[in-house]
Image: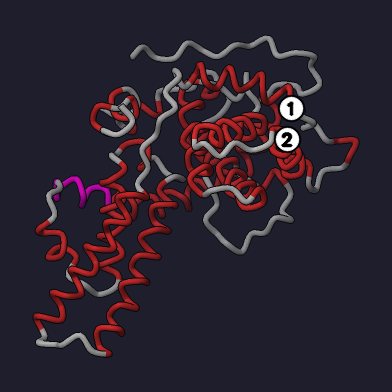
Amino acid sequence: MGMNFWHSTHYLYWMKDVTKADLRKRNPQDRRHLADDEIDSIHLANISRWKTMLMIWWFLVFAEVLEEIGPRLRVRQIIIYTAIIFYRRFYQTQSFVNFDPHLVVGTVFFLASKVEESQLSLTTVASVLHHYTTTGVDEDESMYTFQDKDILECEFYVIEALQFDLILHHPFPSLLQYGYINLYCISRLLRTNNLSLDCRFLDEFEIHEECLQLAWQLVQYSYRTDIILLYPPFMVAYAAAYISCRDAGYDAAQVFASVNIKKDLLLKIVGEFQEAVEDEKRLYAVQATALEKLEEIIPDASAAEAEAAPSAPAEK
């Protein structure tokens, strides 16, 4: 089940026939307090590398907190992206009103480490989560003092909301195949220009490495958009490869002409990558307001125990 994407729960229950409109229909409680763009802006990850760890927590969005926590814990990169998918799926049906996203971030990260067979210490995860949710906040104003038991309790709710579907397929393995596609592109270029495998080939190989790096970054970026939730992972990988080939000056259409994939779907995803960049500009414009509203609707951390249980997930 985990080896064949088309027969996996990832595709059958979480992607097949799902549209952007479907993603916007969820979280009815949140939509009583927040507009769609405000909800998206909260989930939006910041792609600007100049932002540092010293930023106070309310300028951080939660998917980027996952990316910050990962390097600090020195974990495998795949754990970070598994956690992001769990987070996105959880809030397709659940509400900020019932579940504080600060706690959910730590919980999905801990859960992802177990799913990817690289389990992290619960105490360490709680400690790092505390660091990122209290940095820049006065001690007497700190609301986020989650403990180990809070993460363990929330984990049950997360797993239930995920319908126990914990096996994921990621674009990264398919992207490794892109290296061979790109080498094929280079060899075709050499043959077309009657070049031998000399230093000129080495110059072209440097472009190949640049292509692979850009494609990898685009795949990482897809986790901050709806693209990763709507399209098969291997198609996301090939779309990223297509863009990187094109930007490096290759005839991307010619390179992918011999690849057995749906070209119309490939170009559609390429277009959505471009649209996502423009969408970010709009979402960032409302992000500050959205985060202020979020503070008003999340559960009171001082409450003894949360009485809310997860909303019933959609039937499979």
Contact? badges 1 and 2 (CB < 8 Å): yes
Badge 1 or badge 2: first in the primary sequence: 2
Q: Who's the residue at 61% across and 64% down the image? A: 50
In the rendered view, tell whether residue 40 sits above or below residue 90.
Answer: below
Find residue 23 and name its label: none
Classed neighbour count for the residue bearing mark 1: other residues with Cα under 10 Å, few (<14), some (14–19), many (≥20): some
Q: Who's the residue at 47% across and 10% down the image? A: 312
Give the image location of residue 172, x and y in percent: 37, 50
* Residue 17 in view, yes or no: no
Q: Which quarter of the rendering shows the N terminus?
A: top left
Q: Which residues are magenta?
A: 262-270
* Residue 168 in view, yes or no: yes
Q: Who's the residue at 40% across and 65% down the image? A: 213
What is the secondary structure assignment of the residue under circle 1?
A: helix
The three-letter code of the residue at mark 2 reads Ala
Relative to 105, is 265 on the left or the right? Answer: left
The residue singled out by tag 2 in the image is 126
